[in-house]
Image: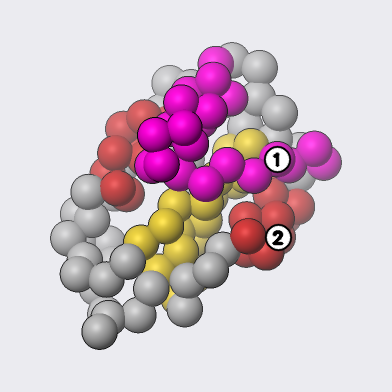
Amino acid sequence: MPPTVSIILPVYNEAGYLEPCIASLAAQEYDGEIEIVVADGRSDDGTRETLERLHADGTVILVDNPDRRQWSGLNRAAERATGEILIRVDGHAVYSLSLIHI
């Protein structure tokens, strides 16, 4: 069985990029289990609302990052992650469907 993978990303005000980013991560061509853990730095541009919707439908795990620092968001997301492998990405990119290749 392939190892489980946690994809972690810290975000802040990524409303214009977030949905295509998350869609590309959720559509990965990987046979193992994937979880997407997003640490939001208290965004105020609609990012938070998008993340709450994606969390409610099970697409992402939402973590608060009240410090609003990238390093803090990464640490908080990594603490919440349960995968055997951790992959760090950014919230303003669209990823190849073969990003996870083990």
| Residue 57: image location, x then y, percent | 39, 34
User: Up-down: is 12 above or below 88?
Assistant: above
Q: Residue at position x 46%, y 26% from top?
A: 53
Secondary-structure class at tag 1: strand
Residue 14 visible somewhere in the drawing: no
User: Position of 33 compared to 49: left or right?
Assistant: left
Residue for badge 2: 75
Figure quadrant of residue 5: bottom left
Identify the mark at residue 24; answer none if there is no mark: none
- Please provide the residue range marked out in magenta: 46-67
| Residue 12: image location, x then y, percent | 62, 32
Distance from Cα at disc 2 to Cα at disc 1? 11 Å
| Three-letter code for the amino acid on which mark 2 is drawn | Asn
Residue found farthest to the bottom? 1
Residue found farthest to the top? 45
| Three-letter code for the amino acid on which mark 1 is drawn | Asp
User: Position of 9 compared to 34: left or right?
Assistant: right
User: Up-down: is 50 above or below 55?
Assistant: above
Residue for badge 1: 64
Q: How crowded is mark 2: few (under 14 residues within 10 Å), some or many (20 or more)?
A: some
Figure quadrant of residue 60: top left
Q: Is residue 96 magenta?
A: no
Q: How crowded is mark 1: few (under 14 residues within 10 Å), some or many (20 or more)?
A: some
Q: Residue at position x 36%, y 29% from top?
A: 19
Q: Residue at position x 36%, y 61% from top?
A: 34
